[in-house]
Amino acid sequence: MNISEVRELLLNAPTEDQLAELAQDQRAGVKKMLAAYYKRQKQAEVERERFHKMLSYERQYYAEGAKLIAGVDEAGRGPLAGPLVIAAVVLPQDVFISGLNDSKQISASKRDKLYDEVLSKALSVSVNIVSISNIDELNIYRATQQGMGEVLLHLDKQPDVALIDAMPVEAGNIKTVSLVHGDALSASIAAASIVAKVTRDRIMEKLAVLYPEYGFAGNKGYGSREHMQAIDDNGATCWHRRSYEPVKSMNLEAVEKRENILYSPIKDGYEYEPQK
């Protein structure tokens, strides 16, 4: 085989006999490609072992009789502006999603790819966009807790068990399990983390077009120095949380919203429209 044929073979599941034959090839290019092949195989094995560990809680509850297990996580508890986004994801038992992890540990480009893969492989997905008015009325803890219960009940395939990132939640007859740092411990929670984070980031990028002076595309609503200066200079928008300091003490009038933003439901879930 020429070098191009060897490269093609190593990208398409070579047999043990073919690998043994290539191991006898003395060409430097073949040796380099073969070494790279075995390195990729080792990395893939390590990743499968890591992912297997992230399914340990799921395996525990499947062994106890659960048929469907959901993961629940949120994005946006801390920012001064923008909605809270909560996602619930039900993955199949035999799922494998390479690179799936806590969304905070992954680059934006990688999150986008994982988002698409999660949606394509999930059995059910539900997304709850919690309005600024709910956050201000209930406080962020209660708004999160309530929103997590709602997002579970709106899954079109009701789970027996829900693994939830660090929050005690009630959701009808669904058994709920709170896991501290769950987005790093459970594949189901990590999947929900990705969906929630990507959904919220895309909302903030849309808001950045409407309100360019606040830098929402970059700060995602968090209180960066530039964001705080923009509030001082321009006032708070209707997307700023009035119950959060320092906005709470500023006594600022809301800037008129410049146009409606409509969000399309993802897969078979649902979304609340943010408060206008």
Image (cartoon, helix red, strand yellow):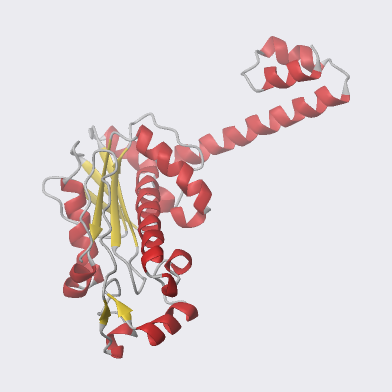
- Between 162 and 100, the one lying in front of the other is 100
Quadrant in which the C terminus is drawn: bottom left
Q: Is residue 184 visible?
A: yes
Residue 124 placement (x, y as % from top left) = 26, 37
Q: Is 127 above or below relative to 159? A: below
Q: Is residue 100 visible?
A: no
Quadrant in which the N terminus is drawn: top right
Residue 120 placement (x, y as % from top left) = 37, 33
Residue farthest front in this picture: 258
Q: Is 4 above or below relative to 226? A: above
- Between 209 and 113, the one lying in front of the other is 209
Residue at left 55%, top 38%?
47
Left-right relation of 85 to 12: left
Residue 117 placement (x, y as % from top left) = 42, 37
Residue 206 placement (x, y as % from top left) = 37, 59
The quadrant holding residue 39 is: top right
Q: Is 228 above or below relative to 68? A: below
The quadrant holding residue 93 is: top left
Q: Is 241 above or below relative to 69? A: below
